[in-house]
Image: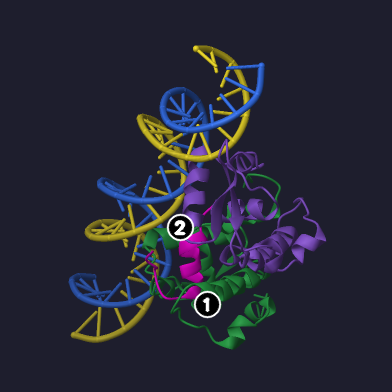
Chain colours: A purple, B green, C yellow, D blue
Amino acid sequence: MDFRSDCPISSTLDIIGDRWTLVVLRSIMVGKRRYGELLEIPERISTNILADRLALLEREGLVRKSAYQERPKRYEYRLTEKGADLLPVIQALVEWGLKHIPCRWEPPMDYRTASPETFYPAEDD
Amino acid sequence: MDFRSDCPISSTLDIIGDRWTLVVLRSIMVGKRRYGELLEIPERISTNILADRLALLEREGLVRKSAYQERPKRYEYRLTEKGADLLPVIQALVEWGLKHIPCRWEPPMDYRTASPETFYPAEDD
DNA sequence: CTAGATACTTGCGTTATGCAAGTGACTCGG
DNA sequence: CCGAGTCACTTGCATAACGCAAGTATCTAG
């Protein structure tokens, strides 16, 4: 990974600063863990972009892929601590959106005030 | 502006979710107000992208362009309340970057804990 | 052994970004 | 009044990212 500068803002954006990465992360946070589930989000992400973003998130250590069953082998994606730590960014986006864009869907309050730890319950496997 | 969904997260990202917009906003927050100053940021933004992002920020009402002198007429860009309200997003990006990316430049603490009002001192003109 | 489900990959056209060079308004020194 | 300089962009063109549709690979149930 090379960064545009050593500013922590631009560097973070070098990793997650595009149209889709945080949307995928948000979706995992609200419980969508499988590729098929993620394809069904209302933003209509396309298959190649989703695969690409999941690979990027895994490569950057924000998400971990693990088999949740054998025969047939199926995988799910879960947040790591590094990924869950983006919750404050996402929460700040929620607050800005609700204040400045009319008629947005309002997430439940417990999501808006949750802490990152809520989203990586078991780092074991 | 059309949005991918009515989720406040994806909608906010529809406006500012690219590689450059928040970097420009950050630069304005730390006191760079003129086109020429903004061109000198360490991330090396190109002229067309900067002009494009400034136009977008103005169109979306996050930034206001105003003449700071006549003869020769010169303009500067200042945050509106709507733009300054993105400070929490930027601060969250700072904290994540400092925690998870090694060797980043560390902004002064008063920037990291400031509130949006700091950045739109006078809405008059 | 064939249909269906899951999880991707490939191809290809459109949009966004990056780099270099050019333009237009103004100002100042001679 | 003329030419050089500054500021704030704009234009042209090449590369990278995104969006859509279709195809592939693996497994499983019937």
The amino acid type, in three-letter code, at marker 1 is Leu
| Residue closest to the far right | A109
Q: Pointer 1 and pointer 2: residues touching (CB < 8 Å)?
A: no
Q: Quadrant of the C terminus of chain A?
A: bottom right
The amino acid type, in three-letter code, at marker 2 is Arg
Is residue B34 shown in magenta? Answer: no
Q: Which residue in the structure is indicated by mark 1? A: B98
Above/below status of B34 relative to A48: below
Q: Residue at x 76, y 61 (%)?
A: A111
Q: Residue at x 42, y 59 (%)?
A: B49
Q: Which residue in the structure is indicated by mark 2? A: A59
Q: Do the residues indicated by labels 1 and 2 lie within the same chain of the protein?
A: no
In this orientation, which residue lies closer to the viewer: B28 or D22? D22
Residue range corresponding to the magenta coloring:
A1-19
Is residue A15 shown in magenta? Answer: yes
Above/below status of A1 relative to D23: below
Distance of label 1 from label 2 (alpha carbons): 19 Å
Q: Secondary structure at mark 1?
A: helix
Estimate the x, y position of residue A76 in percent, counting from the top left. Answer: 59, 47
Above/below status of B27 relative to C15: below
Number of residue marks: 2
Q: Chain of mark 1?
A: B
Estimate the x, y position of residue B97 in percent, counting from the top left. Answer: 52, 73
Estimate the x, y position of residue A81 in percent, counting from the top left. Answer: 60, 66
In this orientation, which residue lies closer to the viewer: B52 or A100? A100
Q: Secondary structure at mark 2?
A: helix
Estimate the x, y position of residue B106 in percent, counting from the top left. Answer: 50, 83
